[in-house]
């Protein structure tokens, strides 16, 4: 310990120093003879544990020195030494900041070391207390700064879920000042369901003493949060409160949801790719079957008098076969991603035929009401696409009514779209449109679902009951044809889809010609080499070609056909060959035949165009590339055109 002694009397200085050293040899005493010197030593920054200040100093007495001394920042304790009769001075010294005083009376040299020791010990406690207070204050400020600067919501609740503390981030979620929240219950600011879960978790932490974390969704903004509840214990280990930290994990959750969505879409895409591969694989065989059905049906119709019941029945069968042909073509288009045929069509017959097919698949509790009233029903589209659009919309409507039944209403009308409509729907243009409306009386849709219905893979159906592509496909088809689609729905009140397709003003005469029955062109005995590897199609082809007035030689083996042509190249006027055949495909056969006779016309047909396209066929020099199944009228016109040298 280091002590500064200010005493002008040399004898007293010596006696006091000896008394202090005798009490504790570790005490170091520095002596000065005046108040100015004492103040100078302190001003130099010398650290002392105690100042012994005599009252009667030259020039400046002890009280005056004490007054100036007490203006310092870090002060050691001061003990005032006074003479007998100066007790009042001692009282003034105590008021001025001195720790204690000692009167120079009998025995004071024994009392002084005790007072000095007590003063230094008390001062040490005061210093330690101040240091602890400062450290605590710094710690609190650091903690508060940390709590207030974090992006997490932090708050403190008691056993009754009353707010004891909350940081600014959490307070910002309320619309009231802090003093109006502290002391109030959690339930006063949250819903019953949210409060129930929170209270249960607080109770669990109080009972177990263990921290608890769980995810929840905010009632205010729909964000996702990770909430952690931790016990706050006193010195005895008793839980006094719960610290709650809520971390915003909305971005992470949405990223996870997006990842799951992408993975789901990838899985769906892989399924669709596999389905496309499978569809393309069976398309050839299915088209061969259709070729046989359609071919023999057409031959039979030519042998039966018109107007008979049998003729009508076979006509219905042929019509269904044409629908099957269109569906297979759609499958092939899907699997190969080729462009569909777009031409002027009459939309009303497509709507009527689709509803007839649909009626058989819907439960009796769903009533179909059809209203078709159009003056201009021609649209530039693919009939299979129109069929697909209506089927998808009606199927969705039926799903909405499958539980309680209802009314499915399909309306076809003409509308003139004005500029007001196009302002609301910028993709549309003013003009005459064909409007197709599909409405139901089902359960309807919420606004949240309405925003997503055209998103690929979005579905409200049970797992395994839908791909989520139906309405996305409808939307894509409508947009492709320059149309507009709108939807109105309300939960519990049904839905209505309106599709606007531009009315086509040209192509009416062409359509009229297509729909009218025309005379089939006939041959004049020209010789045809017909190559097909399926026996039933060979026989059907022979009958059809002979009935058209041609002489036919058929082969079911491409190798045999090549040898026959090589031996008699001038015997034939035309070669008709299938594409998919064992050992030698139709395109290879055509190349070999044209090596022998370059001027021979060749017609190549196939049930699946994955292996060869029309462009590829033309590059090889093939005159006509056709898809199975084909009509008698179509094959007759094609043969006549090729033989006349007018192939495209």
Image: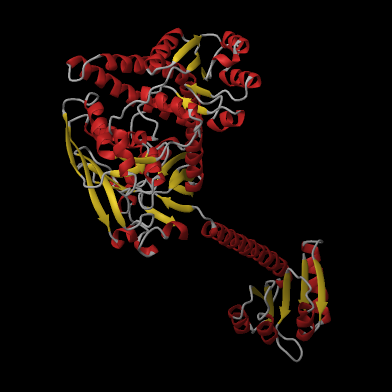
Q: Quadrant of the N terminus?
A: bottom right
* Residue at the (47%, 24%) spot, across then down: 275
Residue most toward the bottom? Answer: 59
Up/down of 586 relative to 270, above or below: above
Q: Name the spot of residue 213 as percent of width and height, x first.
A: 47, 40
Q: Is residue 25 left or right of residue 489?
A: right
- Look at the image and tell me whether residue 194 can be seen: no
Viewer-side residue, 624 vs 316? 624
Viewer-side residue, 141 vs 15? 141
Q: Name the spot of residue 198 as percent of width and height, x first.
A: 37, 43
* Residue at the (30%, 21%) spot, across then down: 318
Q: Name the spot of residue 331 as percent of width and height, x first.
A: 43, 27
Q: Is residue 330 left or right of residue 75?
A: left
Q: Name the spot of residue 459 as percent of width and height, x first.
A: 36, 35
Up/down of 120 relative to 266, above or below: below
Viewer-side residue, 331 vs 267? 331
Q: Is residue 198 left or right of residue 599?
A: left
* Residue at the (73%, 89%) spot, across then down: 60
Up/down of 310 relative to 235, above or below: above
- What kind of colouring is applied to the model shown? secondary structure
- Look at the image and tell me whether residue 353 can be seen: yes
Where residue 518 sits, quadrant-wise, is top left
Residue most toward the front? Answer: 524
């Amino acid at each position: 310990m280091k002590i500064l002694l200010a005493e002008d009397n040399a004898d007293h200085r010596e006696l006091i120093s000896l008394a202090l050293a005798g009490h504790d040899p570790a005490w170091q005493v520095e002596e000065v003879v005046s108040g100015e010197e004492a103040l100078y030593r302190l001003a130099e920054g010398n650290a002392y544990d105690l100042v012994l200040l005599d009252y009667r100093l030259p020039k400046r007495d002890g009280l005056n020195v004490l007054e100036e001394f007490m203006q310092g920042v870090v002060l050691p304790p001061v003990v005032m030494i006074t003479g007998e009769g100066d007790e009042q001075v001692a009282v003034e010294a105590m008021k001025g900041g001195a720790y204690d005083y000692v009167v120079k009376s009998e025995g004071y040299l024994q009392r002084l070391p005790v007072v000095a020791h007590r003063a230094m010990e008390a001062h040490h406690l005061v210093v330690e207390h101040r240091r602890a207070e400062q450290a605590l204050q710094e710690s609190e400020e650091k903690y508060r700064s940390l709590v207030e600067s974090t992006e997490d919501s932090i708050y403190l609740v008691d056993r009754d879920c009353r707010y004891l503390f909350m940081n600014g981030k959490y307070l910002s979620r309320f619309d009231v000042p802090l003093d109006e929240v502290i002391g109030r219950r959690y339930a006063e600011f949250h819903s019953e369901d949210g409060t129930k879960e929170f209270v249960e978790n607080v109770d669990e932490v109080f009972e177990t003493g263990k921290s608890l974390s769980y995810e929840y969704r905010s009632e205010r903004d729909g964000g996702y949060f990770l909430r952690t509840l931790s016990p706050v214990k006193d010195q005895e280990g008793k839980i006094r409160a719960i610290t709650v930290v809520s971390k915003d994990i909305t971005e992470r959750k949405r990223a996870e949801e997006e990842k799951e969505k992408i993975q789901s879409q990838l899985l769906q895409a892989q399924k669709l790719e596999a389905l496309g591969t499978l569809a393309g694989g069976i398309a050839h065989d299915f088209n061969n079957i259709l070729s046989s059905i359609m071919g023999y049906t057409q031959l039979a119709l030519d042998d039966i008098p018109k107007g008979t019941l049998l003729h009508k029945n076979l006509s219905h069968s042929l019509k269904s076969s044409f629908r099957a042909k269109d569906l297979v073509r759609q499958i092939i288009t899907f699997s190969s991603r080729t462009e569909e045929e777009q031409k002027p069509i009459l939309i009303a017959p497509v709507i009527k035929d689709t509803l007839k097919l649909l009626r058989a698949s819907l439960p009796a509790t769903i009533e179909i009401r059809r209203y078709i009233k159009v003056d201009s029903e021609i649209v530039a589209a693919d009939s299979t696409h129109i069929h697909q659009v209506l089927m998808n919309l009606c199927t969705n409507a039926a799903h909405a009514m499958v539980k309680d039944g209802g009314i499915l209403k399909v309306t076809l009308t003409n509308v003139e779209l004005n500029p007001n409509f196009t302002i609301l729907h910028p993709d549309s243009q003013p003009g005459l449109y064909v409007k197709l409306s599909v409405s139901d009386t089902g359960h309807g849709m919420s606004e949240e679902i309405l925003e997503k219905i055209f998103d690929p893979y979005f579905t409200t159906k049970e797992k395994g009951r839908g791909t989520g592509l139906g309405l996305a496909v409808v939307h894509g088809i409508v947009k492709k044809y320059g149309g507009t689609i709108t939807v109105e729905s309300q939960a519990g009140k049904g839905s209505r889809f309106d599709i606007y397709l531009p009315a086509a003003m040209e192509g009416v005469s062409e359509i009229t010609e297509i729909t009218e029955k025309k005379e089939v062109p006939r041959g004049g005995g020209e010789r045809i080499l017909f190559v097909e590897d399926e026996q039933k199609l060979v026989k059907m082809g022979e009958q059809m070609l002979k009935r058209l007035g041609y002489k036919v030689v058929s082969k079911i083996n491409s190798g045999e056909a090549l040898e026959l042509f090589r031996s008699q190249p001038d015997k034939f006027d035309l070669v008709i060959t299938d594409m998919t055949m064992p050992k030698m495909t139709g395109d290879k056969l055509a190349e070999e035949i044209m090596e022998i006779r370059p001027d021979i016309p060749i017609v190549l047909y196939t049930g699946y165009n994955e292996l060869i396209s029309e462009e590829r066929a033309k590059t090889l020099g093939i005159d006509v590339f056709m898809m199975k199944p084909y009509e008698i009228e179509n094959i007759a016109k094609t043969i006549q055109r090729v033989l006349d040298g007018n192939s495209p």
